[in-house]
């Protein structure tokens, strides 16, 4: 038996329209008159390369003595029973009706899992009905517009776990199985699944090679916050760090013990400790890399940049000692050039010129920290990603495979944030050239404004 999906719901919610949309042919009769679809109709459907059987049911009417209705109901129950999953459709424009509730109650008793689908959600008219749908107690409704073809990726995502359980079938070209998540990414999700709690402070560290002004910056930050908020008010300390609020967001500077210690033992020949730097980077979400304006991006800076990118942290570059720069305009141009050419992993990274000594640029630096943290946490809806993917492939398709076969990219989804991590599903993942992957990563960064954070893209195929 192929993976089978039954579409159920009261008359006129758009079952036949959805069926047609999935099957891609005008098979069922669509009509404005309620109850026009009398029989079960089955069709082979496909979403993002996953094939399945879709069954359009006649709406079951409320129980009555009428034999036709009883028969319809029998048909629907059988369709649900035989399906791997049922889509309970409601009309979001009409809101939740008593008949919808009746359906929900009836389906709750069935063994078949149910996905609640709110149809007619194009535009804004569906919004109230969509919220009402939560009240049915059938889980989160998937908003779609069968007529306009909207929400099909979301529907696909909702179906995927059930398809997995049933053992999905791909289109004929590939007999291999379709994994829901790339393994590495799935591991990463397990390791780091927690969404940021809005009340929890973002954590930041200050790193950089010796003498660039890390301790001065740390003291300036805390001093400034003290000035702004009164002596020690709003500034809390614990063993891990110091916490305050910037632009309405709680911020915690961690690893301050190390900073203070270093300030006391001033040592001109101190060397960069990669191990200590790595340890600091791992403690925080946002890393502020301090550089000396007189020596931007020397070898040690690049080493630290690489560590930050490898650890997947959000990054802000603070170019310090700007007070002694003689020609700021020229220096700024040179700085941008060097960053663009030497640090492609973190293209577009937020760069702020500061003077830790006199406090200039500190507030802008903190703005950049908060911004970059937000980007690091961003989640992009799958539908948006795939709309983008279709465009970039159109503009610049992947090179053909040996033998002239077309390289097929199926779809893309963000599997996690912190940092933004994407899975691209494609045939022959090993044969997608590295340059094309880079093209996609750069495109993602541009299109979704993912500046200054490492982006991960796993290319996966079947097994
Ligand atoms: P069924 O009785 O549940 O099979 O519903 P139909 O598929 O016959 O659709 C009933 C009516 O709703 C028709 O007039 C469709 O054109 C309309 N309809 C279906 N899907 C949508 C949608 O996504 N948006 C809007 N606005 N109307 C829809
Ligand atoms: P760290 O080793 O990175 O913690 O660097 P420090 O904070 O100890 O600073 C090293 C030296 O640079 C000290 O002499 C500081 O006074 C000086 N310094 C730090 N920030 C600035 C700045 O913004 N402008 C200038 N002119 N000197 C600075």
Image (cartoon, rainbow, N blue to C red):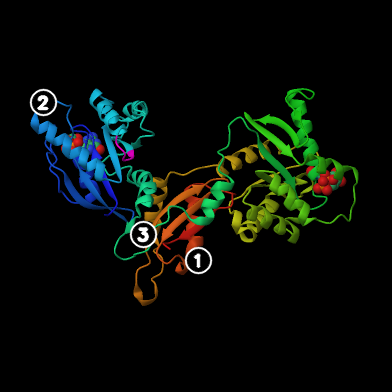
What residue would you read off at disc 2? Answer: 65
Are circles 2 and 1 on residues that touch, CB within 8 Å?
Answer: no
Q: Is residue 83 above or below residue 305?
A: above
Dot 3 alpha-carbon crowd within 10 angstroms: few under 14, some 14 to 19, many 20 or more:
few
What residue would you read off at disc 3? Answer: 394
Mark 2 and mark 3 lie on one chain; the one further toward the N terminus is 2
Number of marks drawn:
3
Dot 1 falls on a residue whose secondary structure is helix
Q: Quadrant of the N terminus?
A: bottom left
Q: Nearer the viewer, residue 69 or 262?
A: 69
Which disc is residue 435 wearing?
1
Dot 3 falls on a residue whose secondary structure is helix
Kindly indicate the quadrant of the structure image that contains residue 305.
Answer: bottom right
Residue drawn 15% across the image and 48% down it: 26
Q: Where residue 8 sits in the image (x, y, percent)?
A: 23, 37
Distance CA(mark 2)–CA(mark 3): 57 Å
- Front of the two marks 2 and 3: 2
Q: Nearer the viewer, residue 155 or 348?
A: 155
Where on the image, by quarter, is ligand 1? top left
Q: Is residue 113 magenta?
A: yes
Q: Where residue 89 sits in the image (x, y, percent)?
A: 27, 35
Dot 1 alpha-carbon crowd within 10 angstroms: few under 14, some 14 to 19, many 20 or more:
few
Dot 2 alpha-carbon crowd within 10 angstroms: few under 14, some 14 to 19, many 20 or more:
few
Give the residues drawn in magenta, as a range.
110-114
Residue drawn 29% across the image and 64% down it: 172
């Amino acid at each position: 038996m192929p993976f089978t999906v039954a579409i159920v719901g009261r008359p006129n919610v758009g079952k036949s329209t959805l069926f047609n949309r999935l099957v891609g042919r005008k098979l069922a009769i669509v009509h404005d008159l309620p109850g026009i679809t009398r029989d079960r109709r089955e069709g082979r459907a496909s979403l993002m390369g996953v094939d399945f059987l879709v069954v359009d049911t006649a709406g079951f009417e409320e129980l009555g003595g009428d034999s036709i209705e009883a028969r319809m109901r029998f048909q629907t129950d059988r369709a649900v029973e035989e399906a791997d999953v049922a889509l309970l459709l409601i009309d979001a424009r009409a809101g939740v009706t008593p008949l919808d509730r009746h359906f929900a109650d009836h389906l709750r008793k069935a063994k078949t899992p149910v996905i609640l689908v709110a149809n007619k959600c194009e535009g804004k008219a569906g919004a109230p009905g969509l919220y009402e749908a939560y009240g049915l107690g059938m889980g989160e409704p998937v908003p779609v517009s069968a007529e306009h073809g909207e929400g099909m990726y979301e529907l696909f995502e909702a179906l995927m776990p059930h398809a997995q359980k049933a053992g999905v079938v791909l289109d004929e070209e590939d007999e291999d199985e379709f994994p829901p998540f790339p393994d590495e990414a799935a591991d990463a999700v397990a390791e780091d699944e927690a969404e940021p709690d809005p009340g929890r402070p973002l954590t930041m560290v200050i790193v950089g090679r010796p003498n660039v002004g890390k301790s001065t910056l740390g003291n300036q930050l805390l001093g400034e916050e003290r000035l702004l908020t009164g002596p020690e008010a709003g500034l809390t300390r614990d063993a891990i760090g110091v916490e305050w609020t910037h632009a309405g967001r709680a911020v915690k500077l961690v690893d301050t013990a190390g900073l203070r210690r270093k300030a006391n033992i001033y040592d001109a020949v101190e060397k960069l400790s990669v191990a200590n730097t790595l340890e600091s980077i791992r403690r925080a979400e946002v890393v502020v890399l301090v550089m000396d304006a007189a020596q931007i991006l020397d070898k040690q800076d690049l080493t630290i940049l690489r560590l930050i990118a490898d650890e997947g942290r959000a990054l802000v570059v603070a170019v310090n000692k700007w007070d002694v720069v003689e020609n700021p305009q020229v220096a700024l141009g040179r700085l941008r050039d060097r960053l663009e050419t030497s640090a492609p992993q973190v293209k577009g990274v937020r760069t702020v010129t500061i003077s830790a000594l006199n406090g200039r640029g500190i507030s802008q630096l903190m703005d950049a920290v908060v911004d970059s943290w937000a980007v690091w946490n961003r989640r992009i809806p799958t539908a948006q990603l795939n709309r983008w993917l279709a465009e970039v492939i159109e503009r610049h398709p992947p090179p053909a495979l040996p033998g002239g076969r077309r390289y097929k990219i199926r779809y893309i989804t963000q599997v996690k944030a912190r940092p933004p991590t994407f899975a691209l599903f494609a045939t022959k993942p090993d044969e997608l050239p590295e340059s094309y992957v880079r093209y996609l990563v750069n495109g993602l960064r541009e299109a979704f404004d993912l500046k200054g954070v490492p982006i991960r893209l796993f290319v996966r195929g079947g097994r």
